[in-house]
Image (cartoon, coloured by chain):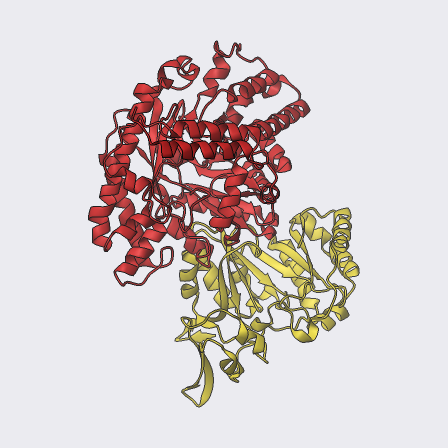
Amino acid sequence: MRDISMERVNGTRQEILDIIKSSTLTHEQKMVCLAGKADSLLEVLDLPEGLDELLNAPIETQCICDLNEGHAPMRPRYIAPDYEKFLKEGSAFLQLEPPKDLFEALNALLIIYKHVPSITNYPVYLGQLDELLEPYIDTVDEQTARKLIRLFLLQIDRTILDSFSHADIGPRPTRTGLYILEAEKELEDAVPNLSLKYEEGVTDDAFMLSAIDCALHSAKPSFANHLMFQKELTDRYVIASCYNGLPLGGGSYTLCRLILGNIAKRASGIEDFKTRELPRVMEIMAAYMDERIRFEVEESGFFEHNFLIKEGLVSRDRFTAMFGLVGLAEAVNLLLEKEGRKGRFGHDQAANDLGVEIMDIIDAFNQSHVNPYCEVTGGHFLLHAQVGIASDIGVTPGTRIPIGEEPEELIDQLLVLSRFHHYFPSGTGDIFPIDVTVHRNPEYVLDIIKGSFRKNLRYLSFYSKDSDVIRVTGYLVKRSEMEKLDAGTAVLQDTTALGLGASKNGKILERKVR
Amino acid sequence: MTKNNETTAVVNKIIPFSSVDGPGCRTAVFLQGCNINCRYCHNPETRKKCIACGECVLACPAGALKRVRDGGGSFRILWDREKCVGCDTCIKVCPHDASPRVRVMTPSQVMERIRRQIPFIRGISVSGGECMLYPKFLTELFTLARREGLGTLIDSNGTISFRDFPELLSVSDGVMLDIKAFDRADHLRITDAPNDTVLDNALFLGEQGKLYEVRFVIAPHLYDGRKSVEGAGRFLLDVYRQHPFRIKLIACRPMGVRRLYRDFRSPSGTELSMLRDLLTDLGYREILLI
């Protein structure tokens, strides 16, 4: 372990004191922040040359960002346990027998959630809830089943205090799935995040209309293109955290992101960007990710000692990593400007074509980079269109068109998106606030989803422009909770603070209503 | 209307994704010109054809309009789509209920604009103005649309008899029909036109299973909505039982209405709900309040 300066120690000590005295953090939030500060004092990773300048820079120039993963990763960033196996076999560590009815199944899940770590310290994956619970749904009468599921979801919202916690349903319609949708529509809570895996012909229209109805009240579920994910990740995949497609029974070691707009700032023009600056930054980021993964696998001890590993609920060889990026729009616009060419990303053919060229370069790099611990995805990372963080200013998530610059017509926006979603098996997505008149025509949304998935879009979210729960970038918050926090009151969920930051820095309340 | 022997229509607007012109996501095509004069018309700029008076040219803040001589000594207004900023000043100042921003298009030109939305749309709806002023155009457009697997709906005020256009009906999924008033005198007062053909169309289309939707615009300042809805409800009950259709009760709102007719009270949600209950009691099922 390398030494650090006393100046840095003292700086951190002051930050620790600030956290302890904070009036807007809850006790749990303080604990998480304090742990982060402890970890920040470590220097145990063998960092690639050139990283410091690209990583430790203000947001105006930063080219690589590790999304606060810390200096000594002690567990994979995203963990997606095989809850089906857990329910089938119980857990020796948790001293739980396999559940026999719905009461026991829900209770068992609520117990294990407390013990599934992640970057947020809350589970980012809560399971394929419909298929997990459907075998138990007839062990109680219908009214009781509905009530139990409602209470289960309520408890999740009030105890898993982070809306990166994600549950999945679909593609098959089930009674459990329907009860979940009915409950979420009424609860209008931010947690859990919810995805419906949609497959035309398997997910019937009636089930979809219930899901859309729910989405227009509570901003969830989002809709995932099941066939697309299945083709890339097989049937054993999950949607976790924001919208991340990951192997079930595994997850992702790490997620770092390229800030493309800032990489473009370093380039003299398009050619320089494509052949020199971008490849160099990608090399460094991949090396950094390799090192983080090496530490997790070889030194952290997680893969030897955690009960999830010991009981086979996750296995090391089902983990991969996410090679993320943001700010394609800024990169394209800036590069065209540097060349003295006209065109805005999202609007002009030349700009969109340049976006595709850049993505092809990133994709090719990723396909040629091999990490020994990513066997599950052929030895490669998965590309990820990162949704941004609260402190981002002038950084558009992933390959999205910047808020405020959306094409006038939704069709034009969708046709642009259809060129980019396919690059990202570990997640991308777009978000559309919808005018309330659509409440009377939910098939409007259904048609857009069907068309989008036929056109190779991957993941779509909708919310009603007037609802309290809204989707910030990938996660959900309540406007009413953001207002409380803004007024200086501590609020239950840590994601509220992220939403508040994003609403101030990222214009998320100004998306074009469709 | 024909151009080089091709059927054409004056197209006011094409909305790529509409959520309010029939079921699901549809491309809505608005044709220019109307044969009646609803006092509450919400898009009066679609009512008439431009006479090239030039008022809009002077008012246009973007310089997107020009008045030019059109061969034979008459004038027409040229609209520069690139310069246009979409501020709607032209249609606000038009003294003639028209718009300079129209295009004369053939069915295949319109189809070209629709094709872009496939596979996001389940169909198209043609509205107006009164689109039944262009029955041949509609027939050709719908034939093309059906070839692409799209649904086809007509939005009509019902004053032109559908009995005369069996070929059009054979390529239409159905009609969304306005019944502006059930009482003949009310209809005349609201629209300057009688409703004999409207009611005949309602029965005829209903029997054919081509009545997709019946709409009532509830405007308390103009007529007794309750009397109208109840009367029409009873009148159509038999055909409804053969081929159910959907009913929309729309609160008349001042947005877009001509200044002369804009000063009125919109009906409340409660008033609409009472009308819905009345129809429900009669046996109607799918009733939307807008």
Q: Is residue B86 above or below residue A428?
A: below
Q: Colour of chain A?
A: red
Q: Is residue A398 left or right of residue B44?
A: left
Question: What colour do you see for chain B?
Answer: yellow
Q: Is residue B240 visible?
A: yes
In the picture, measured across the screen, residue A5 lies left or right of residue B156, that is: left
Nearer to me, A408 or A36: A36
- Closest to the observer, A481 or A25: A25
Q: From what the image shows, is residue A235 above or below residue A388? A: above
Residue B16, horizontal then vertical, whole percent:
47, 58
The x, y position of residue B153, in whole percent, is 54, 57
The residue drawn where x is 46% and y is 70% is B85
Q: Which residue appears at 73% of the width and 62% of the height?
A: B266
Nearest to the observer: residue B104 or residue A319: A319
The outermost residue toward the bottom is B73
Quadrant location, the C terminus of chain B: bottom right
Q: How many marks?
A: 0
Give the side of residue A118 with respect to residue A149, left or right.
left
- The image position of residue A94, as x and y in percent, is 51, 12
In this rendering, the answer to whether B73 lies above or below A208 is below
Q: Quadrant of residue A369?
A: top left
Please report the residue visible at 47 percent of the width from the left and 20 percent of the height from the top.
A83
Tell me which corner region of the image, top left, top right, bottom left or bottom right, holds residue A39.
Answer: top left
Q: Is residue B147 visible?
A: no
Residue B173 image position (x, y, % from top left): 54, 54
Determine the residue positioned at 51% across, 48% down.
A503
Of residue A98 and residue B248, the one placed in the foreground of this image is: A98
